Image (cartoon, rainbow, N blue to C red):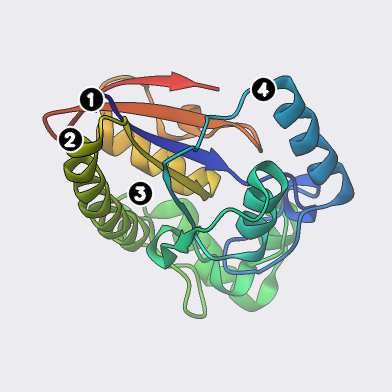
Amino acid sequence: MNSYIHLIRHGITAGNENRWYYGRMDIPLTARGIAQLEKLRADGIYPNVQNADCYTSGMLRTEQTFQTIYGDLPHKTLPLLREMNFGAWEGMSFEEIEQDTAHKAAFDDWMRITDGSFAFPEGGDSVNSFYARVRGGLAELEGLHRLKELSCRHNGNDAVSLVVCHGGVIAAAMEHYFPAQRENFWQWIPDPGHGYTISFAGGKAIRDRAF
């Protein structure tokens, strides 16, 4: 029995097109984003989800991505795998954040504090809280996937789980599973509509493949 978890980043949104910092904002895909997903689907890049357990983060852009790729297949949500919350700076570019006089002290702290403890103003995440939440979501996913593995030992199918979520979440997950494979977090972020397949053996991630 083979064991796989597929992670797919949602398609293009206005936030991607405008280089916004956003995570909590529940915005849709753009027409360009949907067209790109349809092309990637036609190109055959996406994993086969026959007999798979499927999930999204529950946000509109992940739901639309899943529906565009896989149609009306049943799936569940894993809300802990939502993107980082940028607080007062949701929906702003870096240049706009830099000029935000209402949160000048927070911006200075953001540039100065490098240990992950800085939290984005007005209820946003810190890097540390974001990583902790994603690890909790991965633990939930892994628990569900272990149940999938147990069921597949009896039916002869591969154990497959698939999650449509977010670029930052996927990067944090890949750092968690393969800490020595890339130099930094940003190198793990896939392009919109793309992602990774992670192979597992004995409950451990053993290799990955980008698609």
The residue drawn where x is 77% and y is 54% is: 29
Q: Which residue is mark 4?
A: 44
Q: Give the residue pinned by disc 1.
A: 1
Q: Which residue bears the numbered disc 3?
A: 114
- Extreme residue toward the left, this view: 202
Q: Position of residue 90 (x, y in %)?
A: 64, 67
Seen in the image, is 162 located left or right of residue 159? right
Is label 1 in contact with label 2 (beta carbons under 8 Å)?
A: yes
Label 4 sits on a secondary structure element that is loop
Question: Mark 3 falls on what kind of element?
Answer: loop
The answer to which quarter of the image holds residue 158 is top left
Disc 1 element: loop
Q: Are marks 3 and 4 in contact (CB under 8 Å)?
A: no
User: Which part of the image, by quadrant, shows the C terminus?
Assistant: top right
Q: Nearer the viewer, mark 3 or mark 4?
A: 4
Q: Residues within 10 Å of mark 4 (few under 14, many from 20)?
A: few
**Horizontal relation, residue 95 to residue 202: left or right:** right
